[in-house]
Image (cartoon, grey):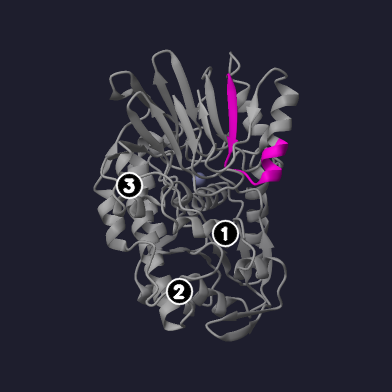
Amino acid sequence: MRLTFLGATQTVTGSKFLLEAGNRRVLIDCGLFQGLKQLRLRNWDEPPIDPASVDTIILTHAHIDHTGYLPRFVKQGFGGSVYATPATLDLAGILLPDSGHLQEEEARYRNKHKLSKHDPALPLYTLEDAQEALKLFKSAPYRKQQSLGPNLTFEFFPAGHILGSAFILFREGDKTILFTGDIGRYDQPIIFDPTPVKAADYVVMESTYGNRLHDGSEGSSGKDQLRQIINETATRGGTILIPSFAVGRAQELLYIIRELEQEHAIPTLPVYVDSPMAVSAFEIFAKHREEHDVEMTQIENNGTNPLQSANVQFVRTAEESKKIAAHSFPSIIISANGMATGGRILHHLLQRVPDNRNALVFVGFQAAGTRGRLLSEGAKQIRIFGQDYRVRASVHTISSFSAHGDYNEILRWLNGFSLPPRKVFLVHGEPNAIIAMQQHIEAKFKTWHVHAPQYLEKVDL
Ligand SMILES: [Zn+2]
């Protein structure tokens, strides 16, 4: 077998790995490069491999840094099958068209403001391209070996990262290679823990938090902080505004708010989920009961929806959204996008941020240069749609929500191996995180071989 690293080397985006086994060419993930311009430009380059030469693509999960290059890859000639778990297939069905829509918006913006040296600036791909790519999808359940050729199989196992996320284990004869995609956390609401793996000859593993530990090792501190903020804000008659990612985080928030209500730890407030994508994601979360962990299933069996607070309202239309913005009673508003760079959250921000009774709560990573980053770092004034607003609401950051295991959780998962892998390849991490993860692994498992590949590196296995 031969492995080529086509992305997520020394960085956290653009996951793409080519596995060649016999005469089969399989691509694991087809992610978009995001963040720094020098990385994003790779999305526009000629692909380093001919898309038409790839037989099959297999996806670890639906996040855009693992799937978002797919529509372009299809447009450039890939015509094989794309395998994913059933929940990943459904989530990609909302995330990829949205990504195509955003690419079109960006091209329109660049043309309008003449920001491109290309005339006209074209989108990387369109909504229609995304819909074409989705036609190639085939679903494969967890724990069922699928054949890819005479001597090659793959199998999905729950990765605990987001709904549908999977480790992929390939087997060629008696040789095995495991791709982790993103590794989730232990004892988190809604989905399963990462599946213990006992053996694989080679492991291609993420290392996003190779140099960090999350606060609150049991994940309880996020819940405690949220309880305190909700109580304080409701007492002063304010509204709690939470910019949130539509898939995953929004569902986790509702789960926790429902728990806090049932424990009588907070008052029952109207909760508005104001994001069409989040509303669709809630439907997908409810549909995929095979993904629900023991606690979720128990609550469901007792006749309660674990992802609904007592007085929740899912908002799709812009008219309903405007009505919420006009409310002046205490409530909780969860809206997208999570970094406040666009979307309905902007209307809520300009409405709520100038009032000192309200609270603004960040629950996800805020990238440099975003409004979310400015606000979370204490900006006293914020510009929205060309107008400046004073920030008088209290601003909070809850950093313990994360869908990635920290290095202790990853070491715990690696500890499940009863035989050392022949080699662990570290990907999907910034250089410092990868170096630290390598040191942690070598300190704990003295004899293991760890390697951090470079972009376009090839290894024979
Ligand atoms: Zn992910």
Q: Quadrant of the N terminus?
A: top left
Q: Secondary structure at mark 2?
A: helix
Residue 156 image offset from top left, x and y in percent:
40, 29
Residue designated by label 3: 90
Residue 355 image offset from top left, x and y in percent:
63, 79
Left or right: 226 as drawn, with respect to 327: right
**Residue located 34% across and 22% down the image:** 152
Q: Is residue 359 above or below residue 403?
A: below
Foreground residue, 181 or 234? 181
1 vs 3, front mark = 1
> Alpha-carbon neighbours of circle 3 within 10 Å: few (<14), some, or many (≥20)?
many
Instruction: Determine whether label 1 and label 2 are within 8 Å by CB.
Output: no
Q: Secondary structure at mark 3?
A: helix
Label 2, label 3: how far apart the Cα atoms are = 29 Å
Residue designated by label 2: 324
> Alpha-carbon neighbours of circle 1 within 10 Å: few (<14), some, or many (≥20)?
few
Is residue 215 at least partly visible in the picture?
A: no
Q: Which badge, 2 or 3, comes first in the chain's sequence?
A: 3
Q: Residue 453's quadrant in the figure?
A: top right
Amino acid, disc 3: Asp
Q: Residue 278's quadrant in the figure?
A: bottom left
Label 1, label 2: how far apart the Cα atoms are = 41 Å
**Residue located 40% across and 36% down the image:** 291
Number of numbered markers: 3
Query: Which segment did they paint magenta?
Result: 422-436
Left or right: 203 as drawn, with respect to 55: right
Please give the label number shown on residue 38: 1
